[in-house]
Image (tube, rainbow, N blue to C red):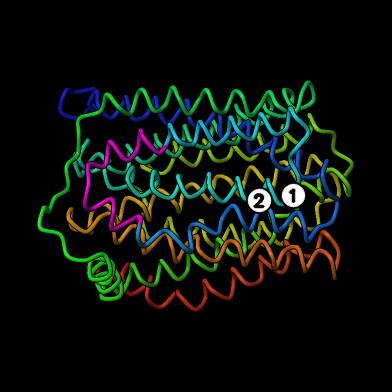
Amino acid sequence: MPERTRLPAAYWRLWWASAVDNVGDGMAAAAVPLLTVTLTHDPVEVSLVSAATYLPWLLLSLPAGALVDRVDRVNLMWRSQALQSVIVAVLAALIWLGKIGVPGLAVLGFVLTSCEVVFANASLAVLPDLVTAPQLHRANGHQYTIANAGQLFLGPPVGSALFAAAATLPFVADAGSFLVSAALLASLPHAPPARTNHAPIRTAVAEGIRWLIGHRLLRTLAGLLAVNTFCFQLGNVTIVLLATQTLHVSEHGFGLLLAAAAVGSVLGGLVNAPLAARIGPLPALLLALTANAVIFVFIGLSPNAFVLGGLMALNGLATTLWSVVTVSLRQQVIPAELRGRVHSVYRMLGWGLMPLGALAGGLVADRLGIRAAFPVAGGLRGVALVAAMPVIVSAMRAAD
């Protein structure tokens, strides 16, 4: 590949940090639901743990975005990973001592995600400083590929196997992955804030909100993301119950189901750049969002684990495709000095409803049955896409 198109060495250090971190996260992604169902089989209690885990995206995303625009972003990234290592180590110790319960698991999940909110906003803001604008689709594609490979393909089978051997093992391994990631991130070129004359936090946050509201396409995509992530959590919060209780999948099999989703996610990361170049980013976005809505309806109707795994793979491909397209678009159009704040507003809107989605999913499963949440979520996704279609089509025509 010609030198001018190669991704720089600093980017690849970020990539390796992401690789190590996401394998650890994948182990935890399989282990936490399995740990939860050893503590309770109540769908509402299961959903409460998930809701607490996602609540920081609603409560802390905006101040975290202002923080990202004020201080060195690289320092924020590695320090948040180091703190996450300590938190997961505490969880492992509590499990080993037999002192963990549903409330404690919910509290630790909240604290852990609070660190993740800071890390995620900083990493999105720092990536455009490491690569050129034409490289963003490819760089984001590589990031999503390794994130999904680690979280959904490599990590879950290992995490479920370690959990079957001893409940503490996947969490000890996850704590170690955070430490390795922190060491790699600390070696990145430092990223001081684009502005040194800082307004008060409230004023800074309001500036980011106003910018996003003023951008018609991005505010529409943010609203669409909010509905989609709400619906994702509405269905996905009880996926462990659908797999283990309705379809009688074992602990090892549950990890393999998550790995099946990763196969599609990895493909989505690999094909996003050529597909976006061939048909255009916004048509690719529409294709992926339509597929997401239809697939969710059929997940709830899965007759066996093999069909469920295939649908999860297709859903992973579509989700990664539209995620890469929207992230690259934001990184291209948001001014450097506003990246942290605007990304944080977008993330708050997109992820802030996930706790409510988790609670809604638990209630739907409790009242209508475990299978019902996915068709309900798929229908809501379809309605939201139809409502957003005029703005997206208008942007497509403007791009032509």
Q: Residue at x 70, y 55 (%)?
A: 237
Q: Residue at x 22, y 46 (%)?
A: 71
Q: Which dot marks residue 106?
A: 2
The answer to whether residue 200 shows anywhere in this view is yes
According to the picture, the residue beneath numbered tag 1 turns out to be 102
Q: Residue at x 70, y 68 (%)?
A: 360
- The secondary element bearing badge 2 is classed as helix
The x and y percentages for residue 59 are: 47, 63
Q: Main secondary structure of the magenta part?
A: helix
State the quadrant of the C terminus: bottom left
Q: How many marks?
A: 2
Per the rendered image, the range of residues in magenta is 64-80
Q: Is residue 3 above or below residue 400?
A: above
The answer to which quarter of the image holds residue 75 is top left
Gap in Å between the C-alphas at discs 2 and 1?
Answer: 6 Å
The answer to which quarter of the image holds residue 168 is top right
The x and y percentages for residue 158 are: 67, 24
The x and y percentages for residue 312 are: 67, 46
Q: Are marks 2 and 1 in contact (CB under 8 Å)?
A: yes
The x and y percentages for residue 81 are: 43, 34
State the quadrant of the N terminus: top left
Residue 163 sits inside the magenta stretch: no
- The secondary element bearing badge 1 is classed as helix
